[in-house]
Amino acid sequence: MTSSPRVFIAGHRGLVGSALTRRLGRNHAVTLLTATREQLDLRDQAAVNYWFKANRPEYVYLVAGTVGGILANSTRPAEFIYDNMLIHATVVHAAHLYGVKKLLYLGSSCIYPRGCEQPMREEHLLTGMLEPTNEAYAIAKIAGIKLCQAYRTQYGDDFISAMPTNLYGPNDNFDLTSSHVLPAMMRKFHDAKIAGARDVTIWGTGTPRREFLHVDDLADACVFLMDRYDGTGHINVGTGEDLSIRELAETVREIVHPGAGLVFDTSKPDGTPRKLLDVSRLHALGWRHMIALREGIASTYQWFMAHHGQLRGAQTTAV
């Protein structure tokens, strides 16, 4: 990067964006550019073009999007596909029009087929049917990858894509109607502890396996890739380690509400049976995660305890 580069974090208030803001904020040679939802509707191409023309970012982290867990994905598919496809399109196009030197687009591991071979390698994209419970979101994310590749092919733009595994950490969404599995689980155990409840209900059978990455590790990986990766294909970002939902629940219980009983509601969907990323390409570049899962859950719960009074009206759009 040049001296004092102008860096735009699209979605700086979300889980990933706030972690990137913390990470890049430690580098005083970087000029950070941000815009709130009220200041800039990322779904509005004219507004985004005007903002890029006025602010002239040199580097862009495109981490904004409408996100949520199984319930939110299943009940709000139109929002998930509309918001995300527009956000990706407007920012990528404006980055092209106004000469951004490099853009990193952040996708999601849900882009891979439901029955994908495990661990999931980058070349598995578009080799099978998607998981029905998050198909709309996955399609939007796949479109974002192809959008970056198309602008690279046609115009030579240095636009790259990274696909993270399941994320958690400070500024996560803990609202039970829209959150992902780990923050939802943490909230359930916390509420049970406060209420003196003996049992906590977990969605599904507890058998699906998931991989989790602390968002501060992801932010570090994004900066690493922005500096050192310029490949055409997307690259997986994760730990390369997974555990069952039951094991995750037992870990959260140990940290938040020891002694609570686990009740598995098998009438609720499990989602994809297993989601584990092959991160060998990222490891070969020289990056590995630093925060162990138990350590990360404990620190996230400490953050939740310090902020849970402010989380009652949690937003579900990380823009």
Image (spheres, grey):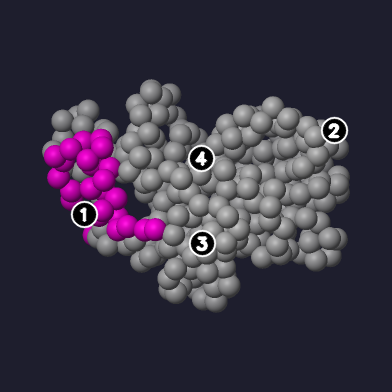
Q: Residues within 10 Å of mark 3 (few under 14, many from 20)?
A: many
CA gap between label 3 and label 1 equals 31 Å
What is the spatial separation of the Cα atoms under label 1 and label 4, in whole angstroms? 31 Å
Q: Which residue is mark 3?
A: 279
**Which residues make up the magenta segment?**
241-270
Callout 1: SS? strand
Question: In the image, which disc is placed on residue 220?
Answer: none
Q: Earlier in the sequence, mark 3 or mark 2?
A: 2
The secondary structure type at the circle numbered 3 is: loop
In this figure, which residue is indicated by the disc labeled 2?
54
> Is residue 90 visible from the viewing direction of this image?
no
Question: How far is mark 2 from mark 1, CA to CA?
Answer: 53 Å
Residue 241, image x, y percentages: 39, 58
**Disc nearest the viewer among 1 and 4:** 4
What number of labels is visible? 4
Q: Earlier in the sequence, mark 3 or mark 1?
A: 1
Q: Quadrant of the N terminus?
A: top right
- What residue is rendered at 44% in x and 39% in y? 169
Task: Name the residue type under label 1.
Answer: Phe
Marks 3/4: CA distance? 17 Å
**Residue beneath label 4, please?**
216
Q: Residues within 10 Å of mark 2 (few under 14, many from 20)?
A: few
Per the image, is 258 magenta?
yes
At 67% from the left edge and 40% from the top edge, which residue is drawn? Answer: 10
- Would you say residue 292 sits in the magenta stretch? no
Percent coordinates x, y for residue 218 in the rendering: 53, 46
Q: Earlier in the sequence, mark 2 or mark 1?
A: 2
Q: Are marks 2 and 1 in contact (CB under 8 Å)?
A: no
**Toward which corner of the image does residue 258 lie, by quadrant?**
top left
- Residue at image x 25%, y 54%? 246
Q: Which mark is residue 264?
A: 1
Q: Position of residue 318 (x, y in %)?
A: 56, 40
